[in-house]
Amino acid sequence: MKKVTLYTLSTCPWCRKAKKFFADRSIPFTYIDYDLADEATQGTILQELDAAGATGFPFAKIGNEVISGYRPDLYASALKS
Amino acid sequence: MEAESRKKALHYFFAKVVEPLGFKFTPDVELVDFLLEQEVMLEGKHGTPFCPCQPIRNDRARDMQIVCPCIPFHRQHFDAIKRCWCGLFVHKDVTDPDSLPQLSPKDVGRE
């Protein structure tokens, strides 16, 4: 199974939906709430967002794919491919 | 100010700001309530009602671009996706906000 990592904000409803998407399907995932992370972790997350052309959360990494925004359609296809 | 009062104040103020920009509050009232609640919390913490779905970078110039309503700073992107990033506002002609995917600037060629 592909590794799933989510970058999220504790204040973001779409981030909650993204977490729920994977939890509801019993797909193991890890997440980091950017706003609750330490400064070094925030810096790393921002670098990854900027490199992907993303401006906001949620930000998902599924295997080698990165997906910006709450995109259940893309989550599903990334898990299958 | 009590949180509920501040939410009402922000709602009143934001409606006046976004209307001439061609936007309105999303018809999803639960989403509006949740997002305004988060903004009131963020305002209490940071002094500014930042977008609840974009990162505070501790870079004043960048952070000012995510103060709600942030539509003027992301006009081309938000016009293309007919909503703002967090979905608090949608284009005036939108009646079904659930039909609007949360597309990034890269997705719509607005990097």
Image: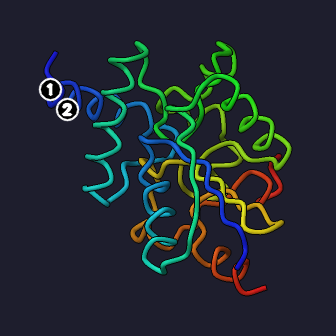
Asked which quadrant contains residue B59, the reply is: top right
- Name which residue lies at 53% across and 41% down: A33
B83 sits left or right of B78 in the view = left
Label 1: which residue?
B5
Identify whether A18 is placed above or below B70: below
Query: How many marks do you count on the picture?
Result: 2
Helix, strand or loop status at disc 2: helix
Identify whether B95 is placed above or below B87: below
Helix, strand or loop status at disc 1: helix
Label 2: which residue?
B8
- Name which residue lies at 71% across and 38% down: A45
Asked whether the residues under the numbered discs 1 and 2 touch, taking CB atoms below 8 Å apart as contact, a structural biologist would say: yes
Asked which quadrant contains residue B103, the reply is: bottom right
* Cα separation between marks 1 and 2: 5 Å
A24 sits left or right of A61 in the view = left
Q: Residue under mark 2: which chain is it in?
A: B
| Viewer-nearest residue: B91 or A63 | A63
Label 2 neighbour load within 10 Å: few <14, some 14-19, many 20+: few
Q: Residue under mark 1: which chain is it in?
A: B
Q: Give the quarter of the figure containing the N terminus of chain B.
A: top left
| Viewer-nearest residue: A76 or A5 | A5
What x and y, as percent, mark residue B95? Answer: 39, 68
* Residue B99 badge: none
| Viewer-nearest residue: A19 or B97 | A19
What x and y, as percent, mark residue A78? Answer: 73, 77
Protein image colouring: rainbow
B106 sits left or right of A19 in the view = right
- Name which residue lies at 43% across and 67% down: A20
Identify whether B34 is placed above or below A2: above
- Name which residue lies at 76% across and 34% down: A44
